[in-house]
Amino acid sequence: MKRKGFIMKVYPDKHEEYEKRHNEIWPEMVEELRRHGARNYSIFLDKDTDQLFGYIEIADEEKWSRMAETAINQKWWEFMEPVMETNSDNSPVTIDLTEVFHMD
C-alpha cells in the first residue's frame, strides 16, 4: 500500500455542509473508491485555516489515477464544488504532500 497525504480547502462558511455531505457519502462512491484501490481514507478539518488534510492508502498509483475519470467521481466533484475550492473541471484544488516520516 502507498500512503498519500494532501491538503484541500473548504469555504469558511461551509464546514458543516462539507462534513454533512461526507457523512452521507453515496454508497456507489465508496464502492468506486474501493474498486480503485482506496483504503483507510480520512479527511481532517482545521477550522482556523479552513484547510482539509486528507490521508488515503492506495494499492496502485496508476489504478488510483483512473478514479478521476469515473462518472460517479465527476458527479461527486460537481456536488462538492459549492463548498470547497475547485479547479475549472470541478476537481478539488489539491496540494500533494511528501511523506517525511512514518511509524507503524
Image (spheres, helix red, strand yellow):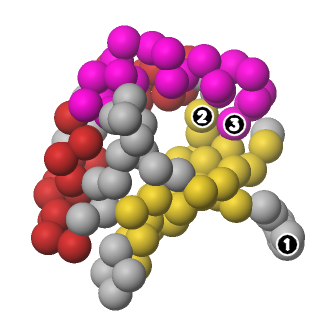
Amino acid type shown at disc 2? Ala
Decide whether residue 77 is among the magenta residues.
yes
Dot 3 or dot 1: first in sequence order is 3
34 and 50: which is toward the camera: 50
Q: Is residue 16 left or right of residue 89?
A: left
Quarter occupied by residue 75? top left
Q: Which of 94/40 is in front? A: 94
Secondary structure type for disc 1? loop
Q: Is residue 97 above or below residue 39?
A: below
15 in the magenta segment: no
Query: How would you rate the neighbour count of disc 1 (Cα within 10 Å): few for under 14, some for 14-19, many for 20 or more?
Result: few
Question: Which residue is tagged 2?
Answer: 38
Residue at point 46% right, 59% down? 8
Location of mark 3 (residue): 58
Mark 1, residue position? 101
Is mark 2 in CB contact (under 8 Å) with mark 3?
yes
**Image: magenta residue range:** 58-78
Quarter of the image for the N terminus: give it: top right
Q: Disc 3 and disc 1: Cα gap in Å?
A: 18 Å
